[in-house]
Image: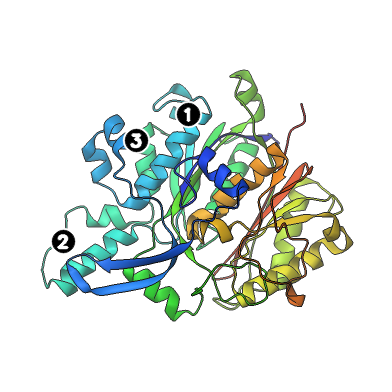
Amino acid sequence: MKRVVITGMGCISGMGENLAKTWESACNGMGSISRVSIAVSNEPELVVEGLAALVPETKFEALSEQFGFRAVNSVDRVANLAAVATLEALSDASLSPRCPELETASVLYGSASGGNNSMEAGYQRLFGARLSTLHPLTVPRYMVSGAASHLSMLFGIQGPAFAISSACSSSAHAIGEGMERIRAGRDRMAIVGGSDASVTYGSIIAWRALQAVSDDACRPFSAGRTGTALGEGAATLVLEELESAQRRGARIYGELIGYGATSDAGHITKPNTASAVRTIKLAYESAKLPMSEPALISAHGTGTLVNDSSEAAALHAAYDATLSSCRVIATKSSHGHMLGACGAIELILAVLALQHRVAPAVLGFLERDPKCDLPLVLSTEPIDYRTTLSTSFAFGGLNCALLARRLEA
């Protein structure tokens, strides 16, 4: 079985437009969730307010300069966010667009909702403005695979390219499946991650109807938590077979060693603790690692009442007495719930935490909830773990756990 390493990372979120700024924000406890007003264009009376973590306004000028205005303008915002993160990840891995290594690489890219902005724009034309025609690129802009195809075309990636859509586990599943393809010898390199851009008028109203969003803050595992906050952005990792990465002298951030995935086969929104436990244990079995090894745990931690208490119970059941030797972070409190992108950005931050030996704080915490009694990192603190577990527990009972470790020199 081949060993899989991370040789490049890139991201864009409310915390920053690149990896360095995102990590700096995380270490300094600088959250990006704020109150926003989202309006429907040309409909000034249609405005909704709520909490969200928005990417600073960008026209994707750098993408347009490098790849041409038409290539950038033909896709939805969600695909261009993916391209920004991927361009950084490739550069970080010392790869350039259309280089020989990418010709046989694969793209596995996650998204929960695809081109949400294009979908809403189309509905506005049809039902708001009462027009009878849509932009001719509406379908390719809103399809969930839009980001995966955009990355393939921009960067000349000619191996398998497809989208994975499993709600909030999308990018975590993409990473795990990319890892398995390399382990099995089917690929030497995989470009994996996810993107979402769903902070829109209709999306905010829909999440509010679900009673899953907060009016004050995203406070994972805290008493008094009232829900999550939407975020947008993208995160990309370059995965490589270890020997191939070493041959080309690539810098290695860490090794992916475990992947677990299960389905609850139960309630559409209520998580199943037993399935979460099984997911975590499968990741450890995949890594051939004992559950007794302490880890930095990057929790799904949405800030909702049910998810947080269920996840806390799962961590206690999975780790038992070892949990007291672990530390738990929950970075949605900083970058918001980025839906299909959250698994990737959370793994990136956890891998950086191992590398820099610093754990970012859980923001917004008020006081301990007896149902969420976890060893939380409540202020940025030094750590010295070799292993990290990153969990994703999505609507529909679609669960994923990833294990990574720092390679010692």
Q: Closer to the camera, 16 or 305?
A: 16
Q: Which residue is tagged 3? A: 154
Q: Horizontal and vertical percent for residue 379?
A: 70, 55
Q: Secondary structure at mark 1?
A: helix
Question: Mark 1 touching mark 2, by CB under 8 A?
Answer: no
Q: Which residue is tagged 2? A: 134
N-term-proximal mark, 2 vs 3: 2
- Residue found at x 77% / y 31%: 408
Q: Horizontal and vertical percent for residue 242?
A: 66, 29
Amino acid under disc 1 = Ser
386 over 53 or under it: above or below: above
Cα–Cα span, label 1 and label 2: 37 Å
Residue 394 visible within the image:
yes
Q: Closer to the camera, 233 or 363?
A: 363
Q: Secondary structure at mark 2?
A: loop
391 with respect to 218 (left or right): right
Cα–Cα span, label 3 and label 1: 14 Å
Question: Mark 3 touching mark 1, by CB under 8 A?
Answer: no
